[in-house]
Image (cartoon, rainbow, N blue to C red):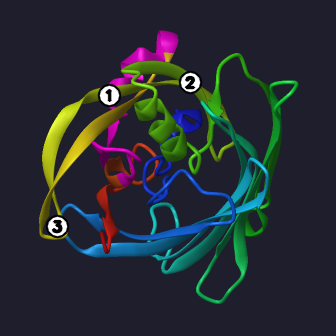
Amino acid sequence: MKRLLFFIMIFSSLACRGALFADEEVVSMNYVCRDLKGAVRWRANSEIKNISPGIYIMTEKAQGVYSSFKGQVSWVAEMKFERTEDNIRPISLDKRVFDAGGNVIRHERQEFDLAANTGICTHKEPARNISRTRKFKFNRDVVTRLSLGLYAQKFLESGKTSERLQMVSEEPQLYNIELKRMGRETIGLNGRKVAAYRLCVDPRLGVLNFVKVFLPRSYAWHSAVPEYEWLGYAGLEGGINSEKVEVLIEGL
C-alpha cells in the first residue's frame, strides 16, 4: 500500500500562465491551496524562464501546512525541462522541504536521460534516516509532478482526448497513468466565470485496480482557449490518507 501513495499534488503546481513560452520571457503565477471548508493550507508561486534554446527551468516556492509533515513547512523545487514542438520532457528535478527552523527535512532528486529513456531518482529524509535510490526504464512519455500540467497544455493543444503516460513520484516510484479530457464546462474563479476543460488523471494499476476504491481520481481545469493555461485542481493533497483539497490560481 505504501508504494501507492503517489498522488502528490500532481496538478497543484504544474502549469504556467501565458504563452508556452517565448524565449527569454519569464512567466510566473501564484496559487493557493484550501481544504474543503475553505481554510488556507499553503500558498505557492512558480516561475518559468528560458536558459538556452528549447531548455527551461521552472522554480516553485511554497509555504504552509502540508499532509505528512508536522507544523509549518516550506519547499523549493526546481525542474529543468525540454520543450519541443509537440512535447514537454523533464531533464531534472531537485526539491528541498524545510521545517519552520529552516532545516532540510526532505530532499528529492530526479535525473532523466532522454536519449536512453531512463531515470535515476533519490529520496532522503535525514531526521528519519531514510535514503532511497531507484533507476527506472520508461516505455511511454514520462512526467513528474511539476511537468504534468505543462504536458497537459501540449495535450490539449494537440486535440487529444486520452493518453497513457508514466509518472515518477516522490517515493520514488514509477506509475502508469491515463490523462483524459473529460469535457468543457464553465467554472467560477476569483469571482469570474471562465470556460475550461476538465482533465482527469486516472491511475492504471493493473492487477491492483481494486486500490482505486481508496485512491480516487484527481481533476484539473485548464482554460478552454489557447494557451490552455492551468486554472485549478481538486483531489487528494498527498497520499491515500491525506486531506482533500482545492488549489486555485490567484490573480487571473
Q: Nearer the viewer, mark 3 or mark 2?
A: 2
The span shown in magenta is 206-230
Q: Which residue is mark 3?
A: 37
Q: Nearer the viewer, residue 142 or 69?
A: 142
Is residue 216 visible in this depiction of the protein? no
Q: Nearer the viewer, mark 3 or mark 1?
A: 1
At label 3, counting other C-alpha atoms closer than 10 Å, the crowd grade (few under 14, some 14-19, many 20 or more) is few
Please give the name of the residue rendered at 26% of the width and 28% of the height, measured from the top-left corner. 182
Q: Is residue 239 above or below residue 103?
A: above
Where residue 201 sits: x, y (%)? 40, 32
Please give the name of the residue rendered at 65% of the width and 71% of the height, measured from the top-left corner. 76
Q: Is label 1 in a helix, a strand or a loop? A: strand
First reached walking from the N terminus: tag 3 or tag 1: 3
Q: Which residue is mark 2?
A: 165
Q: Is label 2 in a helix, a strand or a loop? A: strand
Please give the name of the residue rendered at 53% of the width and 34% of the height, measured from the top-left corner. 4
Q: Is residue 191 above or below residue 99?
A: above
Q: CA distance from mark 3 to mark 1?
A: 27 Å
Please give the name of the residue rendered at 30% of the width and 48% of the height, measured from the top-left corner. 223
Where residue 115 sits: x, y (%)? 87, 27
Q: CA distance from mark 1 to mark 2?
A: 14 Å
Instruction: Tell me, yes or no, whether the highlighted magenta stretch contains residue 164.
Output: no
Q: Which residue is mark 1?
A: 181
Where residue 146 sits: x, y (%)? 58, 51
Instruction: Tell me, yes or no, whether the highlighted magenta stretch contains residue 207.
Output: yes
Q: Quadrant of the C terminus?
A: bottom left
